[in-house]
Image (tube, rainbow, N blue to C red):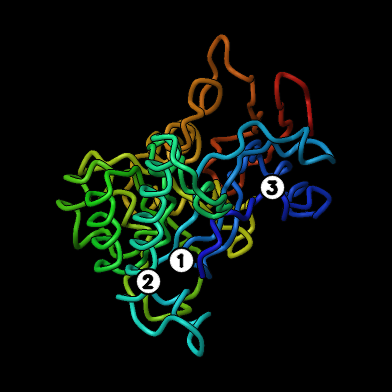
Amino acid sequence: PITPNMRGIDGCNPMDETVELALKGGVTTVAAGPGSANVLGGTFFAYKTVGNCIDEMTIENPIAMKAAFGENPKRCYKDKKIDTRMQISALLRETLAKTKEYMEKKEAGKEVAYDQKLEAMIPVIKKELPLKCHAHRADDILTVIRIAKEYDIKVTLDHVTDARCIIPQIKESGFPCICGPALTHKSKFELANMSFETPNELYKAGILFSIITDSPVVPQQYLSLSAALAAKAGLPEYEAIKAITINPAKILGLDNRLGSIKEGKDADFVICTKNILDTTNEIRAVYVDGKKAV
């Protein structure tokens, strides 16, 4: 359940058809990494959807450390190490505390045995990498915020299915939200409050948020459809477009080069027949780094 030393880039196959379909659907950049089985799963990275070599496609590695709360770690490790949410939190706290001690000893010039897992967590303790936290239920979201405050680390709140009932607490935390996927069945109890209305509630509260497909849960080419359904549920159109462009770029710390069309940026853009949120829209061309890719 504790594998922060794993790297998402080592598990990414750019030859998979999902990458090509994402590009044809207008998705030019993806944040990818380990799934949500482990309390600490390893690092995420960002790559462009053009190419056949993941090393050449990668634009930032790492960009975040994956963590997971709630039913996923419990279900995965039911017969082994984790039966309760308290154990998930305890394992994470133990790793954060050990990392801090390990780092302080190293910085003080003391001799310490090399630990690959703790080395991987040092950027989290130093606030150089955010902890990317899978959390659906309100109590799990609040646990993430609690631990982030205890250890003074940066986090992103991923999925936030129950966000609407704890908007003030999320707003006060200052942490951004990554919403979705909502284009699915309520496949587990944690998703009871899943709704396309959540993005609008976050927007009205002034909370930075993005919309995701969580591929392969929902294929990436349906990202604009997910944003369109959030707009149908009340989110202003322009905010829905921002939720799949500049907002995720800001959350990933890549807005200096991605997320909008501006001099000096990467020149990733899509040419459409209609508004990107119009379900009858056709994508005529996709440009990545100023070059036509589709």
Q: Amino acid at mark 1?
A: Val
Residue type of the residue flagged with mark 3: Ile
Q: Quadrant of residue 286?
A: top right
Question: On the rendered structure, is 287 left or right of 204?
Answer: right
Check disc 1 and report the residue beneath it. Answer: 39
* Other-residue count near label 1 (Cα within 10 Å), few / some / many at <14 / 14–19 / ≥20: many
Residue 46 versus residue 116 in the image, above or below? above
Residue at 61% across, 33% down: 60
Mark 3 to mark 1: distance in Å?
Answer: 19 Å
- Quadrant where the image shows the C terminus: top right
Instruction: Say whether disc 3 or disc 1 marks the residue closer to the N-terminus.
Output: 3
x and y percentages locating residue 12 in the rendered image:
73, 52
Label 2 belongs to which residue?
Answer: 88
Task: Tell me: 166 left or right of 32.
Answer: left
Q: Residue at x 58, y 16 (%)?
A: 265
Pick out the residue farthest to the front: 111
**Front-lying residue, 191 or 112:** 112
SS of the residue at dot 3? helix
Q: Badges 1 and 2: C-beta atoms under 8 Å apart?
A: yes
Q: Which residue: 51% across, 70% down? A: 1
**Which mark identifies residue 9?**
3
Q: Position of residue 234 (x, y in %)?
A: 31, 50
- The span from disc 1 to disc 2 (Cα, nearest Å) is 6 Å
Q: Residue furthest bottom?
A: 79
Residue 202 image position (x, y, % from top left):
27, 48
For residue 155, which numbered disc appears in the image? none
Q: Residues within 10 Å of mark 2 (few under 14, many from 20)?
A: many
Left or right: residue 176 versus residue 115 is left
Cα gap from disc 3 to disc 2, whole angstroms? 25 Å
Q: Amino acid at mark 2?
A: Ile
Q: Work out whether residue 153 or residue 109 is closer to the camera in this orientation and state it.
A: 109
